Image (cartoon, rainbow, N blue to C red):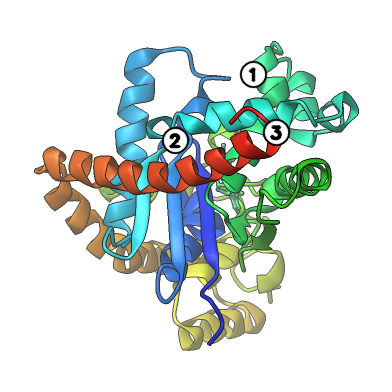
Amino acid sequence: MEKPKRYLSGIQPSGELHLGNYFGAMKQHIENQHGNDSLYFIANYHSLTTIQDAKKLKKLTFEVALSYLACGLDPNKAILFKQSDVPEITQLMWFLMTVTPMGLLQKAVSYKDKIAKGIAANAGLFNYPVLMAADILAYDSNIVPVGKDQVQHVEIARDLAIKFNGIFGDVFVIPDYKLSSSPYVPGVDGSKMSKSYGNTILIFDEGKELKKKVMSIVTSSEPLEAQKNPDTCNIFALYKLLAPKEKVSEMAENYRKGNYGFGHAKMALLEEINTYFEPFRERRKELEKKPSFLLDVLREGGKKARGMAKMTLQRALQSVGIE
Ligand code: ADP
Ligand code: TRP
């Protein structure tokens, strides 16, 4: 029998998680936990390149862990942990830095984008992809499920592993990326949903707040009677992610027939968001009552992950001639 693939991915604790994070990343992480070997971690070292507020970082780290568990990550199946519980990562990062061409990092889109947005560059931001490569390579990961924006980083990890192995022998497993089936979720304004654009619907929004956001989704100004194209509508794009197939076909037909207003569509979307996320909200409320359970999950996960990283580090130390 073929050996199960090892999946690994990380998510930065840089804000409360939204539907783009869920459908673009978390959903597939949670699905992969069945029948695969999977590790998911909270990339708090990476967040230090942008968050310099201890209270905020702590709160958001807890928030990401809570969200994963509430959305169905089972700590008996997948390993959930904090990046910082595996300090070997920073050691591995050094080994990788010594084989990283400067030009490779200068070309990294995430770095170039942040600079273009006026975020002051620190060396951490510049070396961000090397830390990410260490994350990926430390656990002998085969598959890294990510959104489109992270593909280049996984390719860098792959390049560095090949280069290091070429010089020092077979130390690292060569990873590959995997895109989710919804790599692009639009926000309420129609551009990519992102916490930096203030256009998000959060996974745990509910009640009036949620309704207000759904009602604010930008649509065309066609009148009620008009026959409409569902495929260019932001409401429909979100509805498709959540509703059962029959309901999606029904809404598409309503759009095409006409006499179906955007208000109707928004109410239908609101109902589906509530149905989809209600069980997660309930689980979250339960989990919030037992923070020590959450801390135990992270601690246990950290121990297991660290055990794996130590073995990889040992191979690296021997291969370069330090041990
Ligand atoms: P944000 O853009 O809100 O800062 P992150 O960069 O922290 O989100 O993304 C965390 C994960 O969620 C990544 O794997 C990313 O690809 C995915 N993701 C974020 N926003 C979206 C979106 N709008 N559509 C699809 N995937 C997304
Ligand atoms: N850079 C990723 C993001 O912003 C987070 C991340 C850090 C990651 N290390 C990783 C993702 C390793 C996959 C694998 O979304």
Q: Is residue 194 above or below residue 56?
A: below
Q: Secondary structure at mark 2?
A: helix
Task: Identify the residue under disc 3.
Answer: 320
Q: Nearer the viewer, mark 1 or mark 3?
A: 3
Q: Quadrant of the C terminus?
A: top right
Q: CA distance from mark 1 to mark 2?
A: 15 Å
Q: Position of residue 163 (x, y in %)?
A: 82, 43
Crowd rating for badge 1 (residues with CA inside 10 Å; few <14, some 14–19, many 20+): some
Give the residue type that dot 2 points to.
Gln
Q: CA distance from mark 2 to mark 3?
A: 24 Å
Whether residues under marks 1 and 2 lie with C-beta atoms below 8 angstroms apart, the answer is no
Q: Is residue 189 above or below residue 126?
A: below
- In this view, the residue farthest toward the left is 289
Q: Is residue 77 above or below residue 103?
A: below
Task: Identify the residue under disc 1.
Answer: 124
Q: Along the polypeptide, which appears first: circle 1 or circle 2?
A: 2
Q: Secondary structure at mark 1?
A: helix
**Which residue appears at 71% of the width and 52% of the height?**
170
Task: Identify the residue under disc 2.
Answer: 83
Q: Is residue 25 above or below residue 13?
A: below
